[in-house]
Amino acid sequence: MDASILSIDGLSLEFPIYQGAVRALNGVSLRVGPKEMVGVVGESGSGKSVTAMLAMRLLVADSYRVTAGSLTMLGQDILQASERTMLGLRGSQVAMIFQEPMTALNPTRRIGDLMLEVIRLHRHSGRDEARAEALSLLRGMHVADPEHVLRTYPFELSGGMRQRVLLAMAFSCKPRLLIADEPTTALDVTVQRQVLLLMREKARAMNTAVLFITHDMAVVSQFCQRVYVMYAGSVVEDGPTAEVMAAPRHPYTRGLLHALPDRVGSRVPLEAIRGTVPDLTQLPRGCAFAPRCPLAREACRERPPSLPVGHAGWHRAACWAVQEEDGQP
Amino acid sequence: MASALAHSLGFLWYRIRNSPLTLIGLAIMVAVLLVMALAPELAPRDPNLVDLGERLLPPSHAHWFGTDEVGRDLFSRILFGSRQSVAVALFVVPVSGTLGSFTGCLSGAVGGRTDALIMRCTDIVLSVPSLVLTMALAAALGPSLFNAMLAITVVRIPCYMRLARGQALVIREMNYTKAARTFGGSHWHIVRWHVFRNALAPIIVQGTLDVGGTILMAAALGFIGLGAQQPTAEWGAMVATGRNFILDQWWYSAFPGFAILVTATGCNLFGDGLRDVLDPRQKGR
């Protein structure tokens, strides 16, 4: 394989519960190359966040079980790595930003203290040096009065401002991978765009790869080179964003795109995907989407489809119906 | 920095000002602290001066609270007694509060087996009535004021641990703790800078409430002879000795008892008020 930043292969993970298990991930394969911006889309409960949390090893130890597959990040086998190795990776090599900037900053400490702390955790620089660094990072995020911001408490800042502070902290050590877990979901649409543009600009400047988790197809289409569509803990479709958006192949992706207001013309009724997300404790034997799928056939209920092997990097879908049409095995 | 502190203190004062009971509590606490500091100046006589000619005199102009069985002035002894009781509270609350809440936070933040083990230990301590356990410990260590303080401290620690752990469990799941982990903070660092700080408010309240309880506990130990030893003036011990004379010389037990009552009530009123003030759900009232 070429030098991947993040490479997940056939990963299955479950959370044991009373008499059974929640099968959160079922054979997820995913790859992020250097400098790439990769999107992961899916509904709540499709396994996007669990994947990100596992990559950072933030899931509570003993609460989950990896049943198959591997996860390699920056050459480290994350599933086996020691806590010490993880400490070395987190922050300095891999950074993460969260969905809600409102709660991601410690309310009892000043922005300056929080930023200096992160900078000094990884570089043994002096206070003044770190302070200068924090100021220049904030300026890089187009923060108007960084001196003042350093003195404020998080509650005094707006959501967009807080997300900029978090981005500044995330980029403070020039990470090679940034995991962004729905970074702009809680923000206004206008602020959302600014923050995303900033994120892209910084990522390009620092050669940082981005794993961008979201449920917003529109954002993915503008910012990501490649996209993975997840459903019920599996990747159902992947490929270059433009191709996936222009000609979605998996019935689920088609459904998702049909449910976008600005893609269908006016006066055309929006189509919701019928049914609901399956219960992850009782996944069907075959394709997890079969009960909701307009194209479902006998084979779908018996065997789970997989992404066609040997076409990595191409546009492909894990669907029997689609593969039949294409004459793929 | 200084201005921010002044600002929060100003805010606290603004909230407290509107609550008469808290003000009364605060006034009592301040008064007790003053008495403690100024006892030598305020006391009309040496608290340990024996004058057998003036045994068991009722309250009068010369002896405001009367005298005891060896003719010592009870008023002076009560003033000096505040030093013992308050000293106990000033030692026990900060020490047990700091130790207990820090280990509690650590336990909650680390989780898993360590947490289970620590919590079972606190369960054992909490399952025994605290007065009985304190008495047993104090007796085992030997009767002295310092040992009584140690015993009370040890028995108080698990309460703070429980409280802090409960807070830590909530804070551990907060986004900012997770964010701190993604930035590469170690367990120790996160407990110190993120969990402990945010868990502090209820612990401070518990601490002020505990001041009254601790004074009572110290008096109780003094009463059964496990606290300060003769001839040191200590409220609990004075009540205990006075019990022998209670039918004919009511003042002997009554005044030290009253001192305990007032001090403990004052601390509890202030603690209650502080809880209301610091409770974020009451903000904006």
Image (cartoon, grey):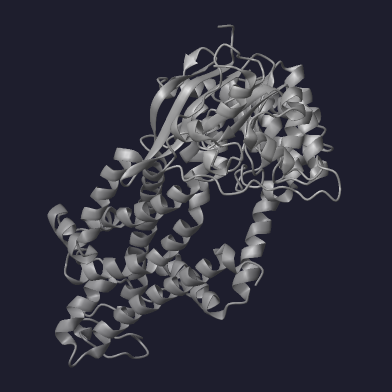
Q: Let me know if residue A319 appears in the view.
A: no
In the image, residue B56 above or below residue B25: below
Query: Quarter of the image containing the C terminus of chain A?
Result: top right
In front here: A161 or A60? A60
In the image, residue B267 above or below residue B56: above
In front here: A236 or B38? A236
Residue A40: percent from the left, percent from the top? 63, 30
**Residue drawn at the location 62% of the way across and 26% of the way down:** A322
Extreme residue toward the top, this view: A2
Query: In which quarter of the view is residue A41 placed?
Result: top right
Query: In which quarter of the view is residue A252 placed?
Result: top right
Q: Left or right? Give the position of A154 relative to B36.
A: right
Query: Quarter of the image containing the N terminus of chain A?
Result: top right
In front here: A241 or A323? A323
In front here: A193 or A303? A303
**Residue drawn at the location 27% of the way across and 58% of the way down:** B152
Residue A50: percent from the left, percent from the top? 51, 35
Extreme residue toward the right, this view: A266
In the image, residue A72 above or below residue B42: above
**Residue drawn at the location 56% of the way across and 80% of the way down:** B20
Residue B111: percent from the left, percent from the top? 37, 41
Q: Left or right? Give the position of B226 relative to B46.
A: left
**Residue drawn at the location 43% of the way across and 48% of the way down:** B169
Q: Left or right? Give the position of A12 relative to A312.
A: left
